[in-house]
Amino acid sequence: MLFNSIEFALFLPIVFLLYWFLFQRNLRWQNLFIVGVSYLFYGWWDWRFLVLIAFTSFCSWGSGLLIQRYRHRPLAKLVHIANITLNLIILGVFKYYDFFVTSFATMFLDGQTDGLLLKIILPVGISFYTFQALSYSIDVYRENLKPTRDIIQFFAFVSYFPQLVAGPIERATNLLPQFEKPRAFDYSQAVDGMRQILWGLFKKIAVADSCAVYVDHVFAAYQSQGGLTLAVAAVLFAFQIYGDFSGYSDIAIGTSKLFGIKLMRNFNNPYFSRNIAEFWRRWHISLTTWFRDYVYIPLGGSRVSKAKVVRNTFVIFLLSGFWHGANWTFIAWGIFHALLFLPLILMGKNRKFTDNIAEGRSFPSLSDMCRMLLTFMLVTLGWILFRADTISQAWEYITMIPHGGGFYTHGVLTCVICVFIMLVVEWIGRGRSHGLELKCRSTLLRYLIYFILIIIMFCVYSNSESFIYFQF
Amino acid sequence: MKQFLRKILIFTLILFILATAFDILLTSKAFRKRSSPLATWNDIFQKNIDADLLIMGSSRAYVQFNPAVFDTILHTNSYNLGINGRSADSQILKYKVFRHQGNKKPKLILYEVSHTTMQVSNGYERFQFLPYLHNLYLWKLYSKQEGFSFADCVLPSWRFLGQQEFVKELLFASENGAYDTPLYKGFRGNNKKWDGSGLRQQETISYGKDTAIISQFRDFLAECRRDSIQVVLVTSPFYIEGTHKMKDPSGMHNMFADLAADFDIPFLDYTYYELSYDTTYFYNTMHLNTIGANLFSKKLAQDLDSLGYAGVLSQE
């Protein structure tokens, strides 16, 4: 079920009303209801994969209990490793098996893969819920969290429908306790949630989907496009992927607010970053912090020798690239970002910009503006790797940009207008949790803004595309 | 909670009112169109079709069978229900809507059959259904074929989502819009000259024989027989070089001849009629231009007259 579908528009109010009016009196029933509707939400795509998510949840829940029971004994470590291995094997088989076999066959078997490929459909959101389940067992093992005995709470934590298929990847330490205590309806939180949903829909429908039409057209036949067209398509892809993914996150977080559950922030205006390190603190925050906490810091982080810092940085970015998909382009994208990040961390400048840009001012300084543009250009260059089918295609695309040629204009104006509106709104609200966190008191003005956004969405709507990050 | 629900309700209500107003604006504009492809639908829904002779088929009916010619020669009132770019699956549904809306039962149907008749329709000009989707009968008929959801039928403006070109056409174009020529009784003559398109594009032309559509077509013929509506199958001229590119043209002929024989109805095949050898009468391989269409309509009307159909049409 897509957030931008009519099914979800019916599903959400029904679930909301039942949640608050029928199940609120009994926490256990309310959690069970969340599990039920989350499984319905997920099963809408393919009910067969419900078995997989239930199995993953059960293993992580069971391992948590066993780790607690055999605490400080070798068995606890064994259970912990077994659970991580099992989760990674499931992820590996469904997501990476065919990639490894194809890569191996290309190198050693002249590309012959007859009978070797599994050709399994990738379960939607498998990387998201696997990582979420893993975070639980790691936190339990590290004694950062007490394991829950309540299997329903745990299943609700793993399958919670707003963030199940594309994040934010929640930590058990944040989300699980919210299932342990009764939720009370909070009017201002719910209203804010609705605004965030609207803003997420705008980013998805108006920005991402309009840009997708142009970008798909150009990438499908990039060899026959002029340099300017290629550059514009790359820039628009940067906004497409941002609108798509951060739009999804906004809808997820907003939806969750309606149920009295707070999810972590996943994007914090990443394109207003002044260097790559700041970009990574603002882009897909839930994944970045996941890797930081569960991989980077255990490896020593930046408090080790320079050689190890280099190693750790590469490990983290390679994993991040590989997490996105079974393709060399994602790995190359990870390496590209590692190369951009390394100089900053080695010079100790990775935490240079931790505040909001142009704090207390309306416009950035010239130097900040230049830094922001440079960072955006570098990130956009990386997105070409991310969007291309192969590395050689990405390289060819990049090398064609300086060449001249005609400019493909069809649909570009719509994209520019929508992107401009998004950037202005997000710039104004850069210190807030989302673009539509309005501070104006006039109801009329607020409603006017809402309806203008809805009208724009209606005007530029292109037949609904799925969310890019579902494939991860 | 009450306050929240009240605000949501107010917001939804305003949205609903705005969407309804916009829907009314668009549909009222659409209902006034006299150009293709909305003109025929408007005639159907306004019950304007009072025809004894009904012409059915794809674009090959729509641009090649001129009702004015049939009216003159057969002394009747005819109407062209041809639907551009669509096969029998869609054509028959259009006929069902036509009947369901209470338009007059025809006495004779001329059904143009050709290589695309028994193919599955590909959604060409899907927008033509949008203004009428609030009609439950039409929605039910076409929803599966065209992928319309129930929301398209019941939610105001929903069906126009993603149809910017069509909406712009309705709001800003002149009465006849991009489809310049107003239709005459569903017919749209085309004055274009031969451009050879279709001939260059296709290596071979094969004919459709989708079993589900053939079965649907048989049901249609059976229904006509039950309703005492006479049917004549007609294959109109096809530019000869196009016919030469056709895979198994005799197979196609036999398919329609067998159907006609099964229902004891005539099948008139003009594939090799003299017009088919001269590009003067065509604007592309499979479509006659206005001159060709008028000449062919005249020939067909005369043949029908000689077969005694003028008498059928004049019966009370």
Image: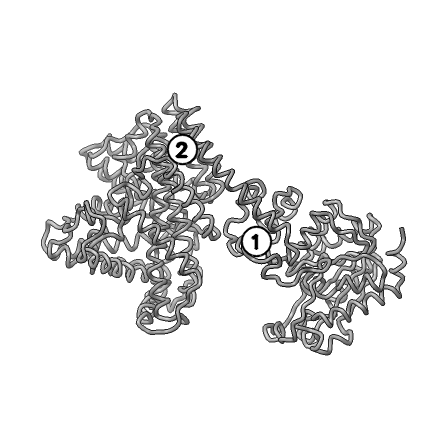
From the image, tell me which residue sits under label 1.
B170
Give the answer, above or below, for where A61 lies relative to B283.
above
Q: Secondary structure at mark 1?
A: helix
Residue A209, percent across and down?
Answer: 42, 53
Q: Amino acid at mark 1?
A: Leu
Q: Please name the residue shown 33% across and 32% down the image.
A: A189
Question: Would residue B286 appear left or right of A385 to someone viewing this image?
Answer: right
Residue A348, percent across and down?
Answer: 11, 53
Give the chain of mark 2: A
Near-viewer residue (B6 or B81): B6
| Mark 1 surroundings within 10 Å by alpha-carbon count, few (fewer than 14), some (14 through 19), many (20 or more) | many
From the image, tell me which residue sits under label 2.
A35
Q: Quadrant of the N terminus of chain A?
A: top left
Q: Amino acid at mark 2?
A: Val
* Colouring mode (rainbow / by chain / secondary structure / one colour): one colour
Near-viewer residue (B33 or B283): B33
